[in-house]
Image (cartoon, grey):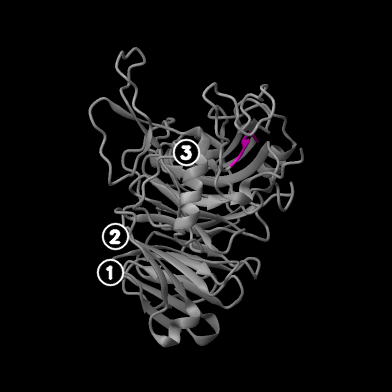
Amino acid sequence: MVRSIKNPKKAKRKTKGSKKSGGSSSNSLGPSLAPKVWQPGVDKLEEGEELQCDPSAYNSLHAFHIGWPCLSFDVLRDSLGLVRTEFPHTAYCVAGTQAENPSWNFIGIFKLSNISGKRRELVPNKKNKDGSSMDSESSESDEDDDDEDVGTSGSPVLQLRKVFHEGGVNRIRAMRQNPHICASWADTGHVQVWDFSTHLNALAESDSEAIHEESNVLNQAPLMKFNGHKDEGYALDWSPLVAGRLLTGDCKNCIHLWETNPFLGHTASVEDLQWSPTEPYVFASCSADGNIAIWDTRMGKSPAVNIKAHKTDVNVITWNSLASCMLASGSDDGTFSIRDLRLLKEGDSVVAHFDYHKHPITSIEWSPHEASTLAVSSSDNQLTIWDLSLERDEEEEAEFKAKTNELVNAPTDLPPQLLFVHQGQKDLKELHWHSQIPGMLVSTAADGFNVLMPSNIETALPANDS
């Protein structure tokens, strides 16, 4: 599993690519080709063709960076509302850098405000030959009828505070119950716990002036520094049920529940850890040995269940907080699987397996708002969103095609559960849903962060009060 960002440089924005158009010159005298959906790994770019982002696919899409690339980040719970649907949005995050020089690394605590977006119809109205809407009785049609701005104009405002971190940050996670408390895994082999309450309070009280790369890197001592691991690691998770209960796993196959002896059950690097969302003593781990283990801390230091999950390294796992029997895992061979843990006693617990991605899975996470939806990122530079409740319905597809006429030219050989494909980021590393803003995702890559809200996720659509 390759996680490190090689030769990291200062992050730059990249253009999203989701449509293929013929010819890059605006002065071309030849006929322009109708845009079509580009399938990564299937279609090839011909000479003179370029990828273009289709903004109509998003309710909101913004890119930003905090200086150096970040391998890991976390979205912080805030006090702005449990379920927020109206633009503009504000989000708080914490991220750890992978700088070119180890002494240049820092943890960034940042606030992204004025996240604007649009309200769009899932099925656009048909247009007459003169360009007017076929559904309008009046010849006067509203401009951008299907593309209504519902947020404050302008770009999002990034406010950033930096805290020095010794070495690169392999992973960083905030405690769910107290989001100002964060734990970081350093490539130096140390796990540290931090209190960022001062920085978060300052950001919350600050105005809309952007504080970006010019801000100073502050020296702050961690609350705790754990030296029990014999090597660096990536696996780290706070318990969602017991405040302050922390799991860490290293590349020497050891799992530590802080202040206890290590749990031994894997034969290779522990890649990821996930506490059960409902059982305070139960957690899952995955490893480069291809296995997933289920542990009960009351039963000693050996796994209660060991599952041969994938043929190659199991890089990431995610436990469904809305359906706690479901556990998803992503592998180095690009496949990801969903298991129903209730079926473990029967042998085969796999209820779904997908091999859409052809490069290692780097992150996977269930939606906190839809039990059947999960997001996946891969080294193939794609972020995909899946809805496992979907099945192919030929009548519905025919009806949709009739409504959209020539407006949609979608491929027919994709899995019906594939809801959305986001592209344009280079070397995708990690993604997270925002637990308080339905439909919002944040992702990090070698060239910075993206905030996105796909337009075809219905829970992301603000209520129409008109």
Cβ–Cβ under 8 Å for marks 3 and 2: no
> x, y (%) of residue 130?
54, 21
141, above or below 422, in the image: above
> x, y (%) of residue 327?
48, 70
> x, y (%) of residue 452?
54, 41
Cβ–Cβ under 8 Å for marks 3 and 1: no
Which mark lies nearer to you, 3 or 1?
Answer: 3
Cβ–Cβ under 8 Å for marks 1 and 2: yes
Q: Is residue 267 left or right of residue 367?
A: left
First in sequence, mark 3 or 2: give its number. Answer: 2
Residue 311: mark in rendering: 1
> x, y (%) of residue 201?
72, 43
- Classify the position of the N terminus by image quarter: bottom left
Q: Nearer the viewer, residue 236 or 190?
A: 236
First in sequence, mark 1 or 2: give its number. Answer: 1
Q: Quadrant of residue 86?
A: top right
What residue does disc 2 label?
333
Q: Quadrant of residue 30?
A: top left
What residue does disc 3 label?
405
Decide whether residue 252 is among the magenta residues.
Answer: no
Q: Nearer the viewer, residue 345 or 59?
A: 59
Which residue lies at the image location 40% right of the left edge and 71% below the top edge? 254
